[in-house]
Image (tube, rainbow, N blue to C red):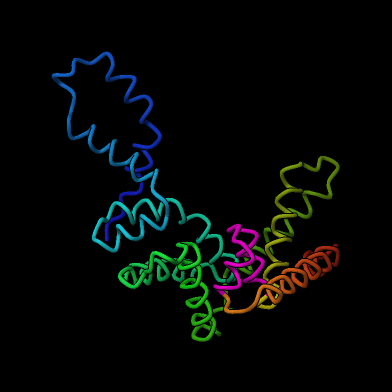
Amino acid sequence: MKIRVDRLVFLQSSTGNYLEMTSVIPSSIQSAESSKEISDSVKLLEQSDEMLMQNYSKGKVEAFEELYRRHQAPLYRYCIRQFRNVSIAEECFQEIWMKLVRSRNRYLSTAKFTTYLYRIAQNHIIDTYRKEKKRLFDCEYDESSSAHELSLQKDARTSEQSEEATIRIKTLNLRKAIGELPFEQRNTLLLKMDNGLSIEQIAEITSCNKESVKSRLRYATTKLKQLLNSNIILPTD
């Protein structure tokens, strides 16, 4: 399946300039096809996720392209923070989109699209944990990132410590701390923190009640604070 995301982004970002140029170009040489593409692109931008998914289920590939453009970055972060193995995370990311494609005709307009997408994502991640136990811990990411962390730590201890190095250390610490959380806490935290989903949506995705979601968020936050304040994340030597 060919995804023309770049074309859509270009049209979106250049719409203003294009309209400005057409005001000085004779109408006889303006491209009706280009004008229609821009008009269609604007219409896509105005549609809700739910409407786009409905249109995609009817065969409109452009609707999928817009959904992909909107949700690829947060979904990728969600996957990459679930696994220490980058290769598995990227495979997972691709498979989630393929599952969405295959299930497009089962989508109900009453379901919020983000809830639908992240239920697919969560279920696939759980399946991946079960199937890829060895690869999850036999991972090139841990070694390279550990060496990088130690290098950054040395830089941060010098008299000319840079703000950028400090920020990167804190980011790596946070990523490692999130990885230390139990799956249910980590999953709930990522759905809330990275994707901004509501308590109600998370409860629906994870098939538990709202109080359980709140409890997992509370435990996850407390555990993160403990990990970030300990020496577990980065050694001091």
Percent x, y for residue 221? 77, 66
Residue that appears at 45% across and 51% down: 70
Q: Would residue 203 be counted in the magenta stretch?
A: yes
Give residue 22's quadrant in the image. top left
Residue that appears at 80% across and 63% down: 228
Percent x, y for residue 38? 29, 36
Is 49 above or below relative to 143? above
Q: Nearer the viewer, residue 152 or 31?
A: 31
Give residue 150's quadrant in the image. bottom right
Residue that appears at 65% across and 77% down: 209
Which secondary structure type mostly characterizes the magenta part of the structure? helix
Residue 237 seen by the camera? no
Q: Would residue 180 be counted in the magenta stretch?
A: no
Is 136 above or below relative to 195? below
Question: In the rendered structure, which segment of residues is drawn in magenta?
Answer: 185-205
Residue 23 seen by the camera? yes
Specify the farthest residue to the left.
28
The answer to whether residue 224 is left or right of residue 9 is right
Q: Nearer the viewer, residue 143 or 182?
A: 182
Residue that appears at 18% across and 24% down: 30
Is 211 above or below relative to 34? below
